[in-house]
Image: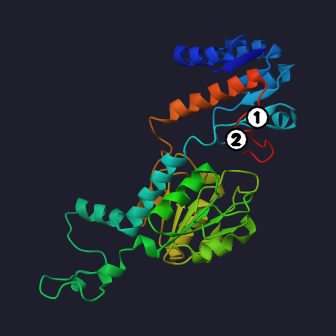
Amino acid sequence: MKFVIYPAVEEERLKKIQDVAGSMQVANCADEASAEHEIVEADGFFGKLTPPMLAAATKLRWVQSPTASLEHYVFPELVRHPCELTNMRGLYGDVIADHVFGYVLCFARNLHRYIRQQLNEQWGGIGGEAGRSDFIAGPGVVSGMDRAHLHMSDCTLGVIGLGAIGAEIARRGLSFGMRVVAVDPVQTEAPEGVEALWSAGEVNNLLETSDFVVMAAPHTPETEGWFRRAQFRAMKSSAYFINIGRGAIVSLDDLCDALDAGDIAGAGLDVYEIEPLPKGHRLWKMENVIMTPHVAACSVHIARRHLGVVVENVGRFVRGEPLTNVANKEKWY
């Protein structure tokens, strides 16, 4: 058997792949031309597969994508090809869930606004200083300042997409005492603690009840351009929208219009319909928006996990065992 890698990996990773490959030949290709040559007799492949490479392959049974997302990886010939495609899903759940709760906590406690006040050397509680409790009367009356700061266990977290990432987001919500509801097109049984699970066609149930709506769905033919003005209008005007899924799912123009109109209270964004977000875009100036530049998955632990998936699947392939992370090529996940 033969396994082709392109682009080439460095010696440390190559050695670990070779160790588990055993007698299977491993070709570590530095350029596309050599990859096209080597893939002719290859049984397995890891890396960036191109249409010419696939056309040259005569024995290919397995392709390992180097990414979790597949919208930029699959092409028509690959979808039709009988080879099995595996991806890198499952690497990022805890990391991205932590990032999401960075947004949630900032919005709940107005940290995004207090940071701006700090930069301007401005003192003042969000909700108004007039109701601040003193050392004489104490906090005996609920004030505007109290109302302006959300109590996490009073809030409902809505998670759209209960894959590895969405499940971790839900778990963190439960640990904060939040009510958690979800939408998923595949799962029909709610995980423990999740109060309600709806199909994608019932997403408005989630939008109408959630204080934080988190988009954790993949980019697929069905989700592309899914969230537009109608979906934001279905949300509470006091709710926050968070997108760590894919930028192509959400119309930025419609999101900006919703924010301008007060359809929703704010947004936390790590992914965008256009990346990098252009200078002069409306989002840059919105004080109720927290933006990060597609970094929610950043962690020193991801590279080790990434190699772990490759090594595990190479071992399984050599032994003739079922592969992990088998993807649906037509659905892109």
User: Residue 102: x, y in percent?
Assistant: 42, 56
Q: Amino acid at mark 2?
A: Leu
User: Residue 257: x, y in percent?
Assistant: 56, 70
Q: Amino acid at mark 1?
A: Leu
Q: CA distance from mark 1 to mark 2?
A: 10 Å
Q: Nearer the viewer, mark 1 or mark 2?
A: 1
Q: Which residue is pictured at 30% across the width and 62% down the height?
A: 116
Image quadrant for the N terminus? top right
Q: On screen, 332 above or below 45?
A: below
Q: Are marks 1 and 2 in contact (CB under 8 Å)?
A: yes
| Foreground pick, 68 / 325 | 325
| Foreground pick, 233 / 301 | 301
- Could you tell whether 328 is left or right of 129 in the image? right
User: Residue 62: x, y in percent?
Assistant: 78, 28
Q: Which residue bears the numbered disc 2?
A: 70
- Could you tell whether 119 is left or right of 171 in the image? left
